[in-house]
Image (spheres, rainbow, N blue to C red):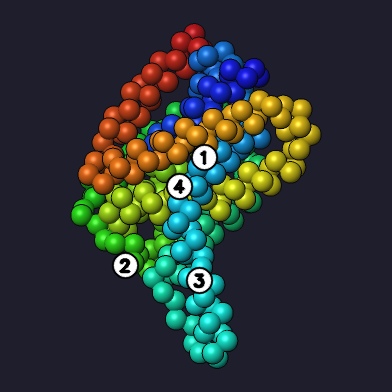
Amino acid sequence: MTILEALILGVVQALTEFFPISSSAHLIIFPKLLGIEDSSLTFDLVLHLGTATALVVFFWKDLFKISSSFIYDVFYHSFKNKKIQFSSDSRYGLYILIGSFPVIVVGLLFGDYIEEKLRQIDMVLIFLILGTILMSIAEYFARVGKDIKELGFSRALIVGFFQCLALLPGMSRSGSTISGGILVELSREEAGRFAFMMSIPVIIGASVKQLIEEWELVSKYSFEMFSAYLTSFLVGILALKLLLMFLKKGTLVPFIVYRIFLIVGLFFYINKWRA
């Protein structure tokens, strides 16, 4: 893979990770369309690590407030021998941890199978269709929505199960998780923020684990991977800001329409490729 190809895939990752159109699907489709050598899961995770870094930088104030409040609540009440009472910021942190748990378990149990069996263009088409249906259902039932403070632990867990769908190439992490948030009655904007915050520990954990296991490959293509990482990080910050601004007043409809065009185009591409 050349530097230019790495940069192109970095931009693709950044735009498609936050917009609910599936980054994993595009990272499988684009190399085929552009004649680029198929990227490995390790390279994909480097790209995801770039966008995860963008999330940390973008939400650093929120993350600091959440973590400092959580530490204060736990240690202060423990020191005073009192029952721990969590503030709203601390509960948000607990929601993130609870919501992250299902995808960690499912990823550890079925991650290898998904990598070996489901990263095929036919499966991408199927999951693109299913993801689009899910987003359409969520948009149909979308209401004004509740504040994140009203989420509760059980609903956080439900959204976490929706995040498990992100393991399937074509579903879209943001699309699945935002849809889950909308279906448990969060506003679009709150669902988007919670989806991105919840993805941070999952993406960073999975990426670091894979990079350690494949360090020889990372070292061999270190410059290409760093270029892709930096590109996905920088473009990712811009894409994230644009999406959250859009979700304040916009809907998921433009992304649903884009996915429908992508499905149609991919369907014809697969049939032409096999002819």
Could you classify mark 4 by the number of other residues whose Cα lies within 10 Å: few (under 14), some (14-19), or many (20 or more)? some
Q: Nearer the viewer, residue 43 or 133?
A: 43
In the rendered image, residue 153, in percent from the top left (x then y), is placed at 42, 68
Mark 2 or mark 3: whose residue is earlier in sequence: 3
Give the Cα distance between marks 2 and 3. 18 Å
Mark 3 or mark 4: whose residue is earlier in sequence: 4
Identify which amino acid the numbered label 1 is placed on.
Thr
Q: Secondary structure beneath disc 4?
A: helix
Q: Which residue is mark 2?
A: 150
Which quadrant of the figure contains the N terminus? top right
Give the Cα distance between marks 1 and 3. 25 Å
Q: Is residue 117 visible?
A: no
Identify which amino acid the numbered label 3 is placed on.
Phe
Examine the rendered structure and indicate whether residue 76 appears above or below residue 34. below
Q: Which residue is mark 1?
A: 51
Q: Which residue is mark 4?
A: 58
Identify which amino acid the numbered label 2 is placed on.
Glu
Q: Is residue 74 left or right of residue 184?
A: right
Q: Is residue 140 visible?
A: yes
Name the residue: 63% across, 19% down. 3
Q: Secondary structure beneath disc 3?
A: helix
Q: Quadrant of residue 149?
A: bottom left
Q: Secondary structure beneath disc 1?
A: helix
Examine the rendered structure and indicate whether residue 212 appears above or below residue 272. below
Identify which amino acid the numbered label 4 is placed on.
Phe
Residue 70, numbered label: 3
